């Protein structure tokens, strides 16, 4: 795509905007030159109990320490709920749209306050105290939001685990953060299918004897198993509590939540976010990137199990007193018009989704989109993976009727919120580019040796200084935090992404440069899938790589060597697919499993993934130097037996 295809800021987008073409540059300059002044002022968007006197205290060298507003105190729940009551008690905070199109509920800020306070009192009744970790394994129902805010209210640290993860994945996360409390539901519903959440928790907890209490929301009424003394129905417990629950005073640097995410090695790590800086970041980015204005209906289609749901369904919008839509279903149920039917029904103004959904819907043509009135929409957003220009143009022309700007927002679980994104009233758009950095974000490109690249260039994306929403550590493993993000390039935060900068200074994210794959916008470590595979008796060795996939962005390609005496059959292949789904969850389903008698290894035994990637990508012509392989002949076999796409 040419760098020169530009969609200039429209008159509509620049009317009444938070940031115009005229002041973006000056504000950005100020944010990076004098962060103390900029963020000292900006943090006043929150209500503080004790105002901070220190703004920034961060160090990207040595032991890596990130602190913002460190002597201030506040409560995140109060900022998302209580403080809006005087003006917005009767304004809708959340709209819930069920999987079934007949189900929807409006919750005002007044209702939200009551629900959250009661939920918080139930948690206290279960014994949850400030600092305790609480695992939330829920479908997309309102109680998921209440549970998160209730934790924040009493100073407990939530760890939301995506409802699509397997019992094993739940157990690993519960054990890692020593969480003694679980909140779940009987079942979730997606696309008409029931998801056995409580049964998964029961299975997971066989490995977690520490867990004292499982609070269960009755959602579908499905039959569930029960462990007396451990399991508690929420609807029964809530009968005995009041809606009066004072909020804990938290330090800005007290943990708000842990969210597990995949990295290039080992098991997922617990990304830790704290209270003050995270909330300032979520709130400001939500307001500016979406140019949110009071009274608008805002819909982010993510799941609260991912960071996008944390920052842009719950904390950002609610801190801003917005109306945020919570959707339980999927884009194609009951049919491929669902997104647009919901937009028409609730008069959605801002719509934020992932490229994988756009690509899947694009395949199904324009008719399902055009069936519904989308005139309420004024802004579209994209997140989670690079959006290819073809999908961008379809989103722009067909969904947005060529009148809505698209904000392509680049960020990560680790960054807490949006980092590189157009501001709709200030930045001209280019299809496929996340454009320019948000306030306070200083991106740079480096080559493999860490040399800074100037001007138009391609390299590895780093961030040179801290921003308030940055993760503070890996829960329980600061060494891993340092290793993962600060060891590749001294003094710089390494994102793991490759990126190109064009002559206009626009950033074009090209994808991960480490062993992380991005499947339908969901991050997976190849090491996780490999360790699931080798846990099966039919596998002695496995290597997993990503390959380009038309809809998912990347697919999963696994090379598997069975042990001597085990035959590589079609049945084994099917069994391994089922096995991985069971071990991790359906998002990790391998697209291809190729049986390989040997994997390409160096003489020192290191698997050469570069070669495996090329074969999976169907690019045998450019395998590069294979002469250092212990046994170059394995490559011919791999090529010969490559799985057809
Ligand atoms: C990718 C999701 C290109 C990127 C918020 C990043 C993107 C990873 C974009 C983080 C985008 C996210 N354009 N790539 N707009 N947004 N990514 O932690 O590779 O689930 O490193 O956070 O997704 O994924 P995560």
Image: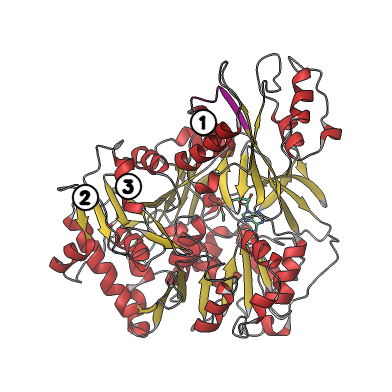
Q: Residue 196 magenta-drawn?
A: no
Which residue occupies the foreground of this view, 251 or 568? 568
Read off the residue under disc 3.
201
Of circles 1 and 2, which is in front?
2
Residue 228 vertical position relative to residue 514 in the rendered view, above or below: below
Q: Residue 538 magenta-drawn?
A: yes
Q: Earlier in the sequence, mark 3 or mark 2?
A: 3
Specify start and end residues of the magenta stretch as a single range: 537-543
> In this image, 68 relative to 358: left or right?
left
Read off the residue under disc 2.
226
SS category of the residue bearing label 1: helix
Q: Earlier in the sequence, mark 1 or mark 2?
A: 2
Q: Residue at x 20, y 55 (%)?
A: 232
Read off the residue under disc 1.
531
Of circles 3 and 2, which is in front?
2
Residue 589 % position (x, y): 56, 44
> In this image, 522 relative to 366: left or right?
left
> In this image, 600 relative to 575: left or right?
right
Question: Quick one: label 2, few (<14), some, or many (20+) residues within 10 Å?
Answer: some
Residue 503 vertical position relative to residue 133 in the rendered view, above or below: below
Question: Quick one: label 3, few (<14), some, or many (20+) residues within 10 Å?
Answer: many
């Amino acid at each position: 795509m040419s760098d020169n295809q530009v969609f200039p800021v429209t008159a509509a987008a620049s009317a009444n905007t938070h940031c115009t073409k005229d002041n973006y540059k000056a504000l950005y300059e100020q944010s990076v030159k004098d962060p103390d002044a900029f963020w000292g002022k900006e943090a006043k968007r929150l209500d503080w109990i004790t105002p901070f006197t220190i703004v920034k205290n961060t160090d990207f060298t040595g032991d890596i320490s990130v602190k913002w507003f460190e002597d201030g105190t506040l409560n995140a729940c109060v900022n998302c709920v209580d403080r809006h009551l005087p003006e917005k008690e009767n304004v809708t905070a959340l709209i819930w749209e069920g999987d079934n199109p007949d189900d929807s509920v409006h919750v005002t800020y007044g209702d939200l306050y009551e629900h959250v306070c009661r939920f918080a009192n139930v948690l206290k009744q279960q014994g949850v105290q400030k600092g305790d970790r609480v695992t939330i394994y829920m479908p997309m129902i309102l109680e998921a939001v209440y549970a998160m805010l209730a934790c924040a209210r009493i100073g407990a640290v939530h760890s939301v685990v995506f409802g699509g993860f397997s019992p094993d994945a739940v157990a690993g996360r519960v054990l890692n953060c020593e969480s003694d409390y679980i909140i779940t539901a009987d079942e979730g519903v997606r696309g008409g299918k029931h998801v056995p959440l409580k049964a998964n928790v029961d299975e997971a907890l066989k490995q977690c004897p520490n867990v004292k209490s499982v609070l269960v929301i009755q959602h579908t009424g499905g039959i569930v198993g029960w462990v007396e003394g451990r399991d508690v129905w929420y609807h029964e417990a809530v009968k005995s509590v009041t809606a009066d629950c004072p909020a804990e005073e938290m330090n800005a640097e007290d943990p708000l939540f842990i969210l597990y995410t995949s990295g290039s090695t080992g098991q997922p790590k617990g990304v830790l976010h704290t209270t003050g800086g995270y909330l300032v970041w979520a709130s400001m980015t939500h307001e500016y990137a979406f140019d949110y204005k009071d009274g608008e209906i805002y819909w982010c289609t993510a799941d609260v199990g991912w960071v996008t749901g944390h920052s842009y369904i719950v904390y950002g919008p609610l801190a801003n007193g917005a109306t945020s839509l919570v959707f339980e279903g999927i884009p194609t149920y009951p049919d491929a018009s669902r997104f647009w039917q919901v937009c028409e029904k609730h008069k959605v103004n801002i719509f934020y989704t992932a490229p994988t959904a756009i690509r899947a819907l694009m395949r199904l043509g324009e008719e399902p989109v055009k069936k519904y009135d989308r005139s309420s929409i004024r802004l579209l957003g994209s997140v989670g993976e690079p959006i290819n220009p073809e999908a961008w143009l379809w989103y722009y022309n067909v969904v947005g009727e060529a009148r809505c700007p698209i904000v392509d927002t680049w960020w990560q679980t680790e960054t807490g919120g949006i980092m590189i994104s157009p501001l709709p009233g200030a930045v001209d758009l280019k299809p496929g580019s996340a454009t320019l950095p948000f306030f306070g974000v200083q991106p740079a490109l480096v080559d493999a040796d860490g040399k800074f690249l100037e001007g138009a260039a391609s390299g590895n994306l780093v961030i040179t200084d801290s921003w308030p929403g940055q993760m503070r550590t890996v829960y329980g493993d600061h060494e891993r935090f340092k290793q993962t993000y600060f060891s590749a390039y001294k003094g710089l935060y390494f994102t793991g992404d490759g990126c190109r900068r064009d002559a206009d200074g626009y950033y074009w994210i090209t994808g991960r440069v480490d062993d992380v794959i991005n499947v339908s916008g969901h991050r997976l470590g190849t090491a996780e899938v490999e360790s699931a595979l080798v846990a099966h008796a039919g596998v002695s060795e496995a290597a997993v790589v990503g390959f380009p996939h038309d809809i998912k962005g990347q697919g999963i390609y696994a090379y598997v060597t069975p042990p001597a005496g085990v035959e590589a059959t079609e049945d084994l292949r099917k069994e391994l697919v089922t096995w991985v789904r069971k071990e991790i969850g359906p998002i990790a389903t391998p697209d291809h499993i190729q049986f390989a008698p040997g994997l390409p290894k160096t003489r020192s035994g290191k698997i050469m993934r570069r070669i495996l990637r090329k074969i999976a990508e169907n690019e045998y012509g450019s395998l590069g130097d294979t002469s250092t392989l212990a046994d170059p002949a394995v490559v011919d076999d791999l090529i010969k037996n490559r799985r057809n796409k």
